[in-house]
Amino acid sequence: MANNDRTGAAAGPTKMTLKDLSVYYGNFRAVYEVTMPVYENKISALIGPSGSGKSTLLRSLNRMNELVPTARVEGEIELEGQNIYASDVDPVAVRRRVGMVFQRPNPFPKSIYDNVAYGVRLTRRMTKGELDEVVEKSLRGAALWEEVKDKLKQSGTALSGGQQQRLCIARAIAVEPEVILMDEPCSALDPVATIKVEELMQELKTRYTIVIVTHNMQQAARASDYTAMLMMRPDRAGEMIEFDETQKIFTKPSDKRTEDYVSGRFG
Amino acid sequence: MSTYLHPRALLDQEMRIIRDDILRMGSLVEEQTARSVTALKARDLGMAHQITEVDERVNALRYKIENECLRTMATQSPAASDLRAILAAMHMAVELERMADHAAGIARIVIRMGGEPLIKPLIDIPRMQMIVNEMIHASLDAYIQLDADMARRVAERDDEVDALYQQVLRELLTYMMAEAKTITGATYLLWVAHNLERIGDRVTNLCERVIFAATGELKDYKPPKNTGPKAEPKANA
């Protein structure tokens, strides 16, 4: 199972394993037979041109695609050895273990405190004191506490874009997931806020496993440990053409198409 | 005035400039090496002085190339083969500059000899120079074509240069032992041979960088053998 990767290198424990994963929207196959490992406590980046299936692949990791009518998958995704698409698995339980941060910061129109507490209240009953603790811990974990501790009752939407995105990260980690999915988390942020999120990712990976979709090659190169390169096949399905350590992908990729993409020659 | 360039077209253009400057520097080094031995053969002090002046141009090119590489890395975020080509060019510029220093070193020996007659006719030194020149030329060809196999073949020829150097060393020792008067003249020639031997070694370094640019393989292609002044000379007269 853990050896079912394409690096051949010992990379530590595998948190998730994709096996011949195809994702369909109706008759259209958006992702074509992807097999790859997601290593524990590492950051894995999904890169590739528009339409190569990166976001679809990412969303399949916590069964978020099921919210799209007509979407279905073939193949398997194992989370610690268990197929998350098995019939007896509750998608809500999967999403609790595999959290998500979206492209545009999307705080709820509620207070900063409630943004973080919202998901926790749904999953666990706890006292006000316990909840306060979780909120503080999550905001600290998202490197936002110092900036908002005196205005927890203010609306989350009043924060800057970078702060909003860190608020969304705090919200995601408040329910204590094991894996965090990030779909272009910095594309709406300025360079300073981007670096803050990237630094945060490095801290988060000591406790979580992270998978990120990014269009920014430098971000993938800077921030990730492993990189999966996706391409659109002639039938328009996204296919993974290379998976390797990020360092290798950006210095000596094996596939010519990866070479052309990371050096900016197409895409 | 300024035509719009697609960002990658700009990168391609900058990569071309770097490559052309490496080739320009390489041809200068070829010429300097060949002329240094020509100056020695003719004990042509004028030519020797000229060689030391041209060396300044080689030095300037090295800094020009380093600046171009720096700028391209800072502004174009090159990756994969572009990044390797830039790193290779930076190393090659340094190697070529040192090679030119060795050629200038030979010219300075010629100046020091001051037109004195040679203690013996030159045979192996011109042969060393010819092989070294062929190696420089071929390594630049391998660079243009990014041909790792060709680069490996060029690097292998360093053995021929090393063998000739040992031969020169042995021969000069017999002169020095036979007649103390020849020691100064023989030492000059030994220095010349040593400079050529060093140029040969540095061609193998160029080849390593070509192999790196082409394949990403980064290693000492040919570990230095126990040649040169450290070797215990056997004086078989």
Image: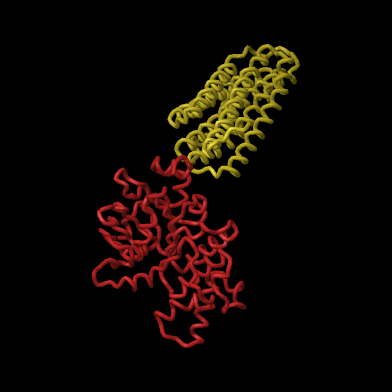
Chain colours: A red, B yellow
Placement of A191 over or under B139, stated as above or below? below
User: Which quadrant does the C terminus of chain B fall into?
Assistant: top right
Q: Position of residue A71 (x, y in %)?
A: 29, 60
Figure quadrant of the N terminus of chain B: top right
Return the x and y of residue A30 as percentages of the image width and height: 32, 53
Residue B24: x and y, percent?
A: 60, 25
The residue shown at (49%, 36%) is: B213
Snapshot quadrant of residue A93: bottom left
Residue A197 lies left or right of residue A240; in this view the side is right
Q: Judge by depth and name the residue closer to the eye, A35 or A106.
A: A106
Q: Residue furthest left?
A: A87
Residue A21 appears in the picture as rendered: no
Q: In the displayed structure, does residue B125 sit left or right of residue B146?
A: right
User: Can the viewer see residue A114 in this picture?
Assistant: yes
Q: Nearer the viewer, residue A107 or A100?
A: A107
> How many circles with numbers are drawn on the protein?
0
Tell me where residue A209 appears, x and y as whole percent.
Answer: 43, 65
Is B59 above or below relative to A112?
Answer: above
Residue at the (55%, 59%) spot, across then down: A189
Quarter occupied by residue B60:
top right
Residue B88's place in the image compared with A157, above or below, is above
Residue at image point 47% right, 60% down: A103
Q: Is residue A115 left or right of residue B72?
A: left
